[in-house]
Image (tube, rainbow, N blue to C red):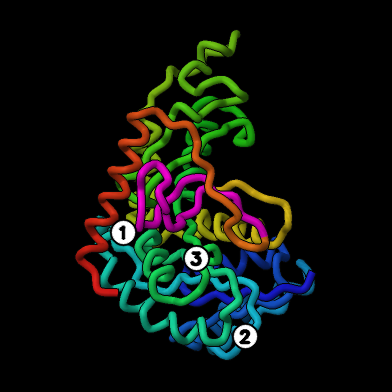
Amino acid sequence: MSSKITIIGAGQVGSTIAFALTLKQLASEIVLIDIAKDRAMGEAMDIRQGTPFIGPVYIHDGDYEDAKDSDIVVLTSGVARKPGQSRLDLAQTNVNITKSIIPQITKVAPNALYVIVANPVDILTYQFVKTSGIPEDHIFGTGTMLDTARFRARIAETYKVGQENVHGYVFGEHGDSSFVPWSLANIGSVPVEKYADAVKGLNLPSFNKDDVEDYIRKSGGIIIAAKNCTNYAIGVTTATLCEALMYKTDTVLTISTMMHGEYGIDDVCLSIPAVVSRNGIASRIIAPLTDDEIAKLRHSADCLKDVIKQLTF
């Protein structure tokens, strides 16, 4: 399958995404673009020299003109989050960076699907929808895909069960106002809070909702404090989203998209389950939430709107 993916930003996140895409052989050509041209060249060259053991993927550095005819464009450019800093603190700085990128990339790749990874991802996805001129069903942020992976990993670790048996999602902002709709979460069709009692013969820990949600929200900060960045999990997450966009078969993912009345929410980008395939966003899934969960989702939307009001796009 011949396909082309361009990644804007060759830092820790962008280069790890490039490596994950190469390992999965999701594109025949991968272009790395960065204002630090030597960094982009070095990362591309390093990955390219491993392709004899992987497959025929041509990865190289380039300029915006080299993004022509891209099927997917991945945006990772921006100032990285510092220890103790929230994603929303980055907002205006990274909005300004994205403002300079949008006209250059959309001119050469007007038909691409755009995956926003840079933080604050919901804000930058909103900016891209509002200002780029690209159809909004071709624009999505990685949103709470990573939060959802962290949720499933934590549940799997706690109950010593395969991660593929854990089902559930994180909704809302990719940030402090995110939440788990526990009414939808289960392990092998058993509600998470009842799983320990349902499994006979094993001494499993009792269900602790606060521990799980704390883990999801604080994981990024813990990793950044320890190694100054998060890159591997978001690299695999982004590659998984790109993979879903390569096929005609629909995939359900919690990506950040523009809301149009779902749960009474308008004019903001956040994550609920969406159906995606090679044509972009096919639909959004209105899952049956409790009244309390709907209130949490609306609160998350309001938190993002409060920030949007303070920004200049």
Q: Which residue, given by chain and number where applicable, does mark 2 sit on?
A: 68
- Mark pair 3, 1: CA separation: 23 Å
Q: Which residue, given by chain and number where applicable, does mark 1 sit on?
A: 87
Kind of element beneath mark 1: helix
Q: Which mark is residue 136?
A: 3
Q: Residue at x 59, y 76 (%)?
A: 6
In what quadrant of the picture does the N terminus appear?
bottom right
Q: Are circles 2 and 3 on residues that touch, CB within 8 Å?
A: no
Neighbour class for label 2 at 10 Å: few (<14), some, many (≥20)?
A: some
How many marks can you see? Answer: 3
Is residue 175 highlighted in magenta? no
In what quadrant of the picture does the C terminus appear?
bottom left
Q: Residue at x 39, y 41 (%)?
A: 263
Q: Residue at x 35, y 48 (%)?
A: 265
Q: Position of residue 25 (x, y in %)?
A: 73, 65
The residue under label 3 is which amino acid type? Glu
Q: Position of residue 104 (x, y in %)?
A: 47, 86
Whether residue 228 is visible here, answered yes or no, is no
Left or right: 221 as drawn, with respect to 311:
right
Question: Magenta part mainly helix, strand or loop?
Answer: strand
Front-most of 98 and 15?
98
Kind of element beneath mark 2: loop
Choose the circle earlier in sequence order: 3 or 1.
1
Kind of element beneath mark 3: helix
The residue under label 2 is which amino acid type? Lys
Please give the range of residues in magenta. Answer: 254-277
